[in-house]
Structures are given as C-alpha cells and as structure tokens.
Amino acid sequence: MTIRTLRDHGQHYRPRMACLKKVEAFVVEMQDPKSGVKASDQKLNITSIPHVITGQDILAWIVTKMKVTTEEAQAFGTMLVAYGYIYPLQNHRKLVLVADSTLYRFQTPYFWPVQKWPAEDIDYAIYLAKRNIRKKGMLEPYEQEHYNNLHKWMNYKWDFIVMQATEQYKASKERKKPDRVVLDCQERAYWIVHRPPRRTHSGMDYGLDRLIDPNAEENIFLTQALMRSAVKSSVSLTAFVKYVTTHHTHDPLLTNPVPSNPWITDNDEFWQLNMRNVDIPTKLSVERWALSFWELISDQRGRADFKLFLKKEHSGENMAFYEAAEEMRWGAATAIPEKSQFIFNTFLKPGAPRWINIDGRTMGLTVKGLDCPHRYVLDAAQTHIFLLMKKDTFYRYLKSPVYKDMQKKALVPAPHNFTDAQLEANAKNRNPGISPIVLWQQQEAEKAAAAVAARPIDVKAMVATNKLDRK
Amino acid sequence: FSGSFGEVYQTFHLSIYMSSNNKFSISPEMATQEVQPNETLSNLKAESDTLKTKLEDERAKLHDVELHQVAEKVDGLGQFIMKTRRTLKGHGNKVLCMDWCKDKRRIVSSSQDGKVIVWDAFTTNKEHAVTMPCTWVMACAYAPSGCAVACGGLDNKCSVYPLSLDKNENLAAKKKSVAMHTNYLSACSFTNSDMQILTSSGDGTCALWDVESGQLLQSFHGHAADVLCLDLAPSETGNTFISGGCDKKANVWDMRSGQCIQSFETHESDINSVRYYPSGDAFASGSDDATCRLYDLRADREVAIYSKESIIFGASSVDFSLSGRLLFGGYNDYTINVWDVLKGTRVSILFGHENRVSALRVSPDGTAFCSGSWDHTLRVWA
C-alpha cells in the first residue's frame, strides 16, 4: 500500500546523510596543512608514500579539536576509518583507529561515501576483474566468492566488464609507480569499506534499504490537532519531576537495591524476596504500593494484598470484574462470546451472585452492548469500576489494618557485603531459578482453583450428593 | 460498523473503522473529501504550512517553562559507574533485536543469520534456539507469560513459537504464523497477554493481530514511509501505543479505533526507536540525526533534546531507567550514552561494543539493561 518511488541514489544513502556531512567537515579540517594532523612521507616496500599520518596524531588532534576524552576520540576516530575517510596502510582489513604509530592516510574525496553514486556491483566486478588480470588470479577467498557470484549473474555483461578492466589496467600502467601504489591502496580501501570481508566492521554496512513516500496527506490531521486541548508545560513538567523524585529510591540503577543487585553480586536473593507468592514482602515494595493505585495492582504481591482487603470489606466483586474485563479485552477473539456471557451472568444481570454496583446508564449501555459482544464492550463499566477503586477503595486500603500490618511486618533485608572470594564463589554458583513456564503453569492452576472456589454454592447439587446433612 | 463487530476484514488496504464512542474519528465528509481541480499541490502545501504555524503558536502559548528550569531544584546525579556484567556470545551474525522476559532474567534475541535464541542472562546459559526460514530477523518479543516468543523480519511475517520445558523438542514444529505484512517486519510486541500482538512494518503500517486465529484486529495507517519501531503505553488505560518511522514522525495511536491521535515531527531524520516514559505521559525517541528527544503527551510538544556536538552518529535504540531519571541510548558509533532526562546533560558514556549497538532494553525491574550489537554479542550492564 505504500507507494514506492524509484530508487533515488541520493536517497539511497539517506539514512546516513546527516552524519556524513558533519564528518566530511571534520575531515576537511584535519587535512589543513597548518592546523590539521601532522603528515609525513613514509617508506613502504621501496616506494615512498606521501602524506602519511599516525594513529596517535589523529587521536590527539580529535581530543583537542572536539574537546572530548581519549576514549570518545578513539570511538570517533574508529568511525572515520569505518566509513572510509581514513584508511590503514598495513592491516587494511581492520577498520579501527589504533592510537599508536600505526600508519593511516586520508582517502581521496573521489572515494568518499558521501558521493551521490552508490558502490554498484558492476564497478566491483570491474575492480575484481582488474585485480585478476594484474595479480594473475590472486584474489582473497572472500573476493573470489564475490567474483564467482558476479560472474554468474552478470555473465551477459562480462565482455564489457573485462574490456573496462583491461582499459583501466592499461591506464594505470602508464602512471608513475608511486602514484600507482597510492591509487591502488585507495581503491582497495574503498572496496573494503563497501564490500567488507566477513570479520570487518564497516560503517557502510548499514543494513536494509528504507523506502519513502513523499506524497503524504497532512491537512486533515493538522486541523484535528488544533482542536485538541493541551496542558500547560509547567503542569506536565512538574509531574515528571515529581514522578522521578518519588521513584528515585525504587530505581535500582540510582539507589542500590537491598540486599544487592543480582547482576553485580551474582546473588539472586533480591529476586527471591520479590516473588509473586512470597509471604512477607520487602519494605521497599510495600512503600511502592502506596505511590498509586496502578503501582499497587501492577505488583502481583500488592494485588494479592489488595484482594485480601477487599475480601474483608466484602467488595471483592469489583476487582474480580476488573480482572475478567481485562482478560476479555486482551484475550483470544474466539473466547469473547463465552467470556461475555460468563461476565454477564456473574456480575451484571439482575440478581447476579457478584453483582457490581455501577450507575444505571452505564449498566444499560453495557448490557445492550453485550448483545453483540466485542472486546471493548465492557470498557465503560471497567473504567467506572477502576476509578471507583482508585479514588475510594485504594485510600481506605492504605488506612486499613491490612496495609498497616503489612508495613510493620515488611522485611528490610540487610545489604550484602561480599568479600572478593565470596563474589568469585557466587559467580561460579549462579542460581538457575525456576523456568517461567513452570511458574506460569502454577499460576494458572491457582487461578482455576480460585475460580472453582468463587463459584456460588449450588445447594441442590450438594443435597443430591449427600454432602449437606438434612436434619 | 456494518453488521456485527466480529466481521473484521483481513485487508491491507486503507479502511476507516468508525466507532460510536470514539472522540477522534474523522467525520465522513472529511474522509471522503475529493480533491477539487483547483487544489494544486502548492495550494495544499501552503495550507499545510499555515496550519502548522497556527498549531505551533497555540502550543507556544501554553509553554511557560522549560524542563531543565523545573528540574533546577532536583539534585544532580554525581558520578555514575556502570560496567558490563554479562556478555552473551552465541550468535553467528549481527544481533538485531532483543527483549526481556517478565521474570527479569531471561532474554530473547534475534540476529541477521535467522537465529532466535532464548538465554537465561543471569547464568548466561542458552535455553532455546530457533532457526527462522529467513535472514534479518529484525523483531523479536517475549510473551508476558514467559511461555512463548514472537519474531519476524524479511519474511514479512510475525510468527509465535511456544517454548517448551523439553530441551530436545523442535520448537519450529509448533510455530504459528500470525501477522502478514507486505514488507519487512521491523518491530513486534505482545500486548498485555499472549493472545495479541502488535506489529510494525516496512510497508508503512502497524497492525494488531489475534494470535490464536491470525486474524487482523486493527490496522494503523498514517506513516508515509517505513515504520521502524513501536512501544505500548504502560498506563492504566492501556489503550494507546506509539510508533516511529522513516518519515521523521512519531505517532500516537488509539488501539481501539485505529486512529492516529497525536503526531510529532521534530526530528531531522529517521526515527529508529521510541519508548514510553514510565508514567505513560511522555515518550523518548532516538533518531539517525544523532539526537534523542523527549515528547510530552499532555502538553503535546517536544520538551527536551539530548544531543552533543561530539555525538554525530545516529541513535538506534533508547530506553528509560525505572524512575525515568536516566535515558540510555545505543548509538551507531558503537557507544552507549546515558542522559539525565530532567537536566538534559549526559551522565556517562559506555564503551565495549565493537560494532553498532542495535538494541537496548532496561530489565523489567530496572536492575540492569541489555544491549545487543552488530558485533554478534549482547551485554548486560549494571
């Protein structure tokens, strides 16, 4: 359904265009004869190569120019090599900046990745064919593989390719030796970046192509956006700050969790103390339940405690209805008619065993909607019940003996203080824990048992099976 | 709706679902408005520009304070040290995506060579491995129950694999094909149960699917280019999700009606990753323009830009810490930057990966975060 435009080769590099333009500016500055990186001539296998720079000089220049740490400069320098702006002279497959006397050269702008023509397969074929002629078949294994593939599917053009390769070879022979060596190095560096061998991390290896459709219709949307109401910045931003501040102590990456962060000490007691069915929860958890109703019911242990409170208040049907509605909303499509029937019989019909108390209008709409049940049919009723619990029941829960009792009983585990030897031992004996599949099966079994227990007692059936003693 | 709601047409073409209690529906007149002959492209563009300016003016009236001003009273974070605590080696090619299990220690990851691996990151043991019939598995997700994983990529589909306690069982045998798009699958996520999956694709759409039947429940049209990422709202109403695409837009969608209810276009390049703020009232995005941005949903505007002159390469993946104070961003220059969300400053930069960081998620209880990279490894940091 997306209209696909013809592949525009400028657009072909679009995902990376922004960063490449910035990098280009840097590279130009680096080559400035006065303020750029110090360059010198180096002897390499008889020939003398001009304008050679060392890794450490590059690093030092970046640190000064960008005002960053050595490590960041290292990362940026590696990017320069990975994108092919600088190429290493010796270990030409490793596209990393090594901060010592390793030699590099600047790539000629002709071969920069920011150019608007892509590295086409036909150019690669010509290059490989040319190499073949020169070194008489001395291609590296990965290049040989590419060559064989290209030969197969570009076979119809092969005469043209060989002709081009021969022409280029003849032209290069007429150049002076030092120029030829430099040009060969540059071309080889270009192709390593654009057709990287297996273990090379090249910046031009960017993944899949992305397409774009420029003819989007926006005006209807903008008109709607104008009609929408928005909140003042001071109000919403203050809310963010408040959220962050209240949750600061609960964030394990900001406040060390007690007894310890399992990933750091290799001891998983923290997770065991916070499991769903633990008897006594930790103080931190209990405090977190008080932050908001949503936090309370998001924590399974908290939800269990809340349900206990509701049982004492004899208003357990609210939570049960909420859970049943959630199950319907997120459940399988085929289960919807059955679930809606069950919910109607249990919670909504007049005289239902767990009848929920919602206003007449909502009840009317919901019951009517249940004629043609869909997954969102209970939304109005569910929101009503949720808000009821959030605004009223929740606050009574916080003041109740159930919660206060839990606050007193809650554990404050002592922080771990492992010696190095103990840490090593922990690392060797990491607890494999219980598979989530097993935990899920346990949970489902508990739910089924609870559903059976919650069903209204059928007196006649009990009499029939002689369970009820008629005296 | 024509007839009962149950008649959902499995179609990939533009359909407008009208709901009776949906505040944001497009009126029938607007939806079927024909383009008049004198409405040239330039007229439409001019109208679009005037509307945009008007919208910006309206929003600016409500913008009475900046985030870092409100955050002045908050304490600074001080020195922040995080290290690699686990390195997961086993993928034979670029790691493209990862997701945590709700048990806070298991992870599913997918890679370019078609392999999907389920790890117990705490012990670093591999628990399950599946070989997909396609390469470039760009999306993977762990089911809320912990009993299944979903994945997809170049096969244009999203498939669900139920996991088994039997190590020798061939998981591919029970595979269930759920979603079908007309281009690559870029991201997928289970909703609050194992029974529904939300997907985004290179065909420019997002879609909600019923796992059991493979039925398309709702489709979301509005992006003008590939949709690259999505995230479900953590809020109590749980009805919305966000998506980011190559058209530089981040859209907020209503899952019930399929409508786009909010849209933000301030990035200068593709949006690679979107993630909700823990409270559900804001979200962050990471883009190829080398910035991460924070958008306030209630004020309907961008409220912070996380960038530095020395950060030039795109951010591929972002996530918040549990309190929302920290924003972790994985970048294409092989580094991970840690930002102070409130103050807008960079707290720390983490090195270690040897190729671009492609996936980054904080664990469900916030004790650590995991980064997946094109260097074939995953790292857990704490």
Image (tube, coloured by chain):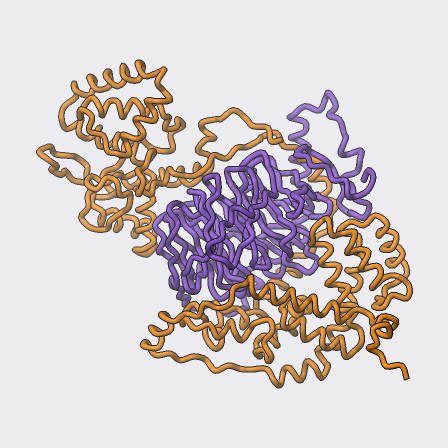
Chain colours: A orange, B purple
Give the side of residue B85 with respect to residue B8, left or right.
left
Q: Is residue A6 above or below residue B304?
A: above
Q: Residue at x 77, y 43 (%)?
A: B6
Along the line of sight, the residue nearer the viewer: A163 or A203: A163
Q: Which residue is drawn at 27% across and 25% down?
A: A128
Give the side of residue A360 with respect to residue B180, left or right.
right
Q: In this view, does A395 lie above or below A342?
A: below
Q: Which residue is drawn at 43% across and 48% down?
A: B95
In the figure, residue A116 lies in which quadrant?
A: top left
Q: Is residue A470 above or below residue B57?
A: below
Position of residue A350 measured from the top left corner of the image (x, y, whole percent): 91, 63
Position of residue B312 measured from the top left corner of the image (x, y, whole percent): 41, 46
State which quarter of the image contains the C terminus of chain A.
bottom right
Give the side of residue B370 with respect to residue B24, left or right.
left
Along the line of sight, the residue nearer the viewer: A89 or B178: B178
Position of residue A379 measured from the top left corner of the image (x, y, whole percent): 78, 55
Give the side of residue A315 with respect to residue A28, left or right.
right
In the figure, residue B7 lies in which quadrant?
A: top right
Along the line of sight, the residue nearer the viewer: B191 or B222: B191
